[in-house]
Amino acid sequence: MLVRIVKMKFKQEAVENFQELFQNSKEKIRHFEGCQRLELYRDKKDRSQFFTYSYWVSEEHLNNYRHSALFAEVWKATKVGFSEKALAWSLDKLVELD
């Protein structure tokens, strides 16, 4: 399993638009082939900083999403609100304890 973490910092005036965009897109992203889980986090102190965690069957599935019309549409609308360049990591999940 591949975990994709994206850190995004928004201009204060863009935060509400991002939250609305995520709300309207989350089901489409989550049900994209190969996406097993999708999470959104907000920093406790810096309320304009968000993190998405998406869990993918494989890197190929993530890349298929990243080259899709859905990603192009969502990313274009998301990045206009950035106050800093987004950072992203792709990680192999090694251990999970419940």
Image (spheres, grey):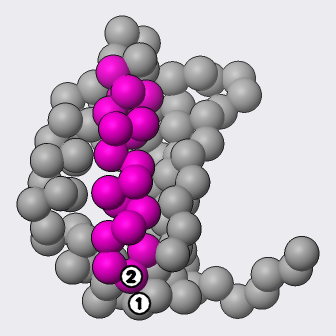
Q: Residues within 10 Å of mark 1 (few under 14, many from 20)?
A: some
Going 38% across and 82% down the picture, which residue do you hit?
34
Residue 50 visible here: yes
Which is nearer the N-term, disc 2 or disc 1? 2
Q: Is residue 11 above or below residue 93?
A: above
Examine the rendering and report whether any part of residue 89 can be seen: no
Distance, label 2 to label 1, CA atoms, is 7 Å
Helix, strand or loop at mark 1: loop
Direction from residue 85 to residue 67 in the image, left or right: left
Q: Position of residue 97 (x, y in %)?
A: 87, 79
Q: In the image, what residue type sits under mark 2?
A: Gly
Amino acid type at circle 1 is Ser
Region in magenta: 17-35
Q: Which residue is mark 1?
A: 58
Q: Residue at x 42, y 20 (%)?
A: 15
Which residue was labeled with disc 2? 34
Q: Judge whether 73 appears above or below 12 on screen.
A: below
Of residues 27 and 68, the one drawn nearer to the viewer in this rendering: 27
Q: Residue at x 57, y 54 (%)?
A: 39
Q: Quick check: 52 left or right of 33?
A: right
- In the image, 46 versus 57, the foreground residue is 57
Q: Quadrant of residue 1?
A: bottom right
Q: Where's residue 75, x and y in %?
A: 22, 47
Which residue in the rendered view is the most extreme toward the right?
98
Q: Are marks 2 and 1 in contact (CB under 8 Å)?
A: yes
Q: Is residue 28 magenta?
A: yes
Q: Residues within 10 Å of mark 2 (few under 14, many from 20)?
A: some
Q: Quadrant of residue 95?
A: bottom right
- Residue 38 sits inside the magenta stretch: no
Q: Which SS type dominates the magenta stretch?
A: helix
Q: Position of residue 49 (x, y in %)?
A: 53, 31
